[in-house]
């Protein structure tokens, strides 16, 4: 039997086993066929009957022949658990895999590898059928900003930091500044392509950000971390503490052109954002409460003349100064 046919048979029979109930009168061949058809597995009733008879020789399944149509189910206390995975599960796993590899410790990734592999095998076995199996080929993620290559991070550093986070142990690191530091790891924050360790240093209590690619070496210590009281990664990030010096919320007023006004109506800057049309012009006034962050400043400057800061004056002056420097560099 060709390898592809053998794989399809294995996947089909595995799915048949998964569909069998563990109690009651059992499920019929027709019901199994209907569910397989829905998943894009085309098979005849006769083939399914052969599958079930063959599988009953090796697994604890039985046929309830007290009434027609016959029902198939697991024997009582069969004691076998099968990983449930259908097309939706497999597609979701493959999409998730693309985005979580840099976020999970190696120990967790190792436990997920069999699931990722099973998802790939399942989807590969359905490539010839017009089902959700092709969904993964129809979806791509594109960043709205310029995508840069991720910096190189030493594998041993990554493993050490992740293990320290899981075990809540301190680490000794050499940073690219040449300093040796003892850190208390609190969490990982992914900002675009850059991975940051959130940690306190030595006996200080204020969390800081350390770029993983700038850690030259790391060693886990046999000492528990000392975390700030009631520390929460979510609250820490939402507070704006990761915005490189900008932490306050501000009421911003922007004058924008018609294109930006349309874009902002579709994707508002904040929940309280309001847009007011300016009479006799193609510009609009936008008022919103936002964090004064480097993302905000980059966004404003990237929009050029289509966005002008009106208030606050301090932000307006800062943006004007940066744009003046840019113009001078091109003169």
Image (tube, rainbow, N blue to C red):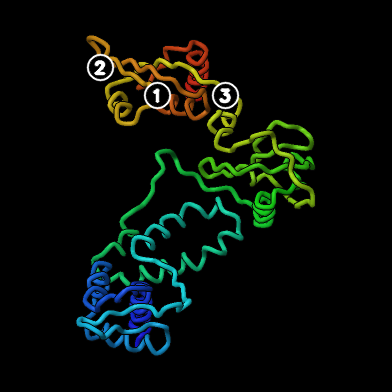
Whether the residues at callouts 1 and 3 have beta carbons within 8 Å, the answer is no
Residue at mark 1 to residue at mark 2: CA–CA distance: 16 Å
Please state the horizontal and vertical placement of residue 52, each as a whole percent of the image: 32, 84
* Residue 216 in the figure: left or right of residue 12: right
Residue identifier under label 3: 247
Q: In which quarter of the view is residue 307 placed? A: top left
Which marked residue is nearer to the observer: mark 1 or mark 2? 2
Find disc 1 in the rendering and name its residue.
304
- Quadrant where the N terminus is found in the figure: bottom left
* Mark 3: secondary structure: loop
Mark carried by residue 48: none
Of pointers 2 and 3, the one earlier in the residue sequence: 3
Q: Residue at x 58, y 48 (%)?
A: 151
Q: Which residue, given by chain and number where applicable, does mark 2 sit on?
A: 282
In contact (CB < 8 Å): disc 2 and disc 3: no
Pointer 3 local density, CA inside 10 Å: few below 14, some 14–19, many at least 20: some
Q: Work out whether residue 157 can be spotted.
A: no
Question: Which image quadrant for residue 303?
Answer: top left
Residue farthest along the front direction in this orientation: 66
x%, y% of residue 326? 50, 23
| Residue 226 seen in this snapshot | yes
Q: Secondary structure at mark 2?
A: loop
């Amino acid at each position: 039997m060709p390898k592809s046919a053998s794989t399809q048979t294995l996947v089909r029979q595995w799915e048949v086993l998964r569909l069998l109930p563990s109690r009651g009168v059992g499920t019929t061949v027709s019901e199994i066929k209907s569910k397989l058809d829905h998943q894009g597995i085309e098979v005849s009733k006769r083939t399914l009957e052969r599958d079930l008879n063959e599988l009953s020789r090796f697994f604890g399944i039985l046929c309830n022949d007290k009434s027609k149509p016959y029902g198939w189910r697991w024997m009582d206390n069969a004691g076998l658990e099968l990983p449930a995975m259908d097309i939706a599960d497999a597609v979701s796993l493959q999409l998730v895999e693309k985005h979580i590899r840099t976020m999970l410790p190696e120990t967790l990734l190792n436990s997920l590898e069999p699931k990722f592999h099973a998802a790939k095998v399942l989807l590969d076995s359905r490539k010839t059928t017009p089902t959700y199996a092709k969904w993964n080929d129809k979806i791509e993620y594109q960043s709205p900003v310029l995508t840069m290559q991720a910096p190189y991070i030493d594998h041993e550093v990554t493993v050490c930091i992740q293990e320290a986070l899981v075990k809540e142990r301190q680490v000794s690191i050499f940073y690219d500044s040449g300093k040796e530091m003892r850190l208390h790891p609190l969490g990982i924050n992914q900002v675009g392509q850059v991975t940051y360790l959130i940690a306190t240093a030595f006996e200080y209590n204020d969390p800081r950000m350390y770029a993983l690619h700038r850690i030259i070496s790391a060693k886990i210590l046999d000492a528990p971390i000392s975390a700030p009281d009631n520390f929460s990664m979510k609250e820490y990030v939402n507070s704006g503490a990761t915005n490189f010096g900008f932490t306050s919320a501000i009421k911003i007023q922007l004058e924008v052109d018609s294109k930006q006004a349309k874009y902002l109506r579709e994707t508002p800057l904040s929940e309280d954002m309001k847009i007011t049309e300016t009479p006799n012009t193609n510009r609009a006034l936008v008022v919103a409460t936002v964090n004064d962050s480097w993302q905000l400043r980059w966004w404003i400057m990237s929009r050029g003349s289509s966005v002008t800061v009106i208030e606050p004056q301090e932000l307006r002056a800062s943006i004007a100064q940066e744009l003046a420097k840019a113009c001078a560099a091109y003169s």
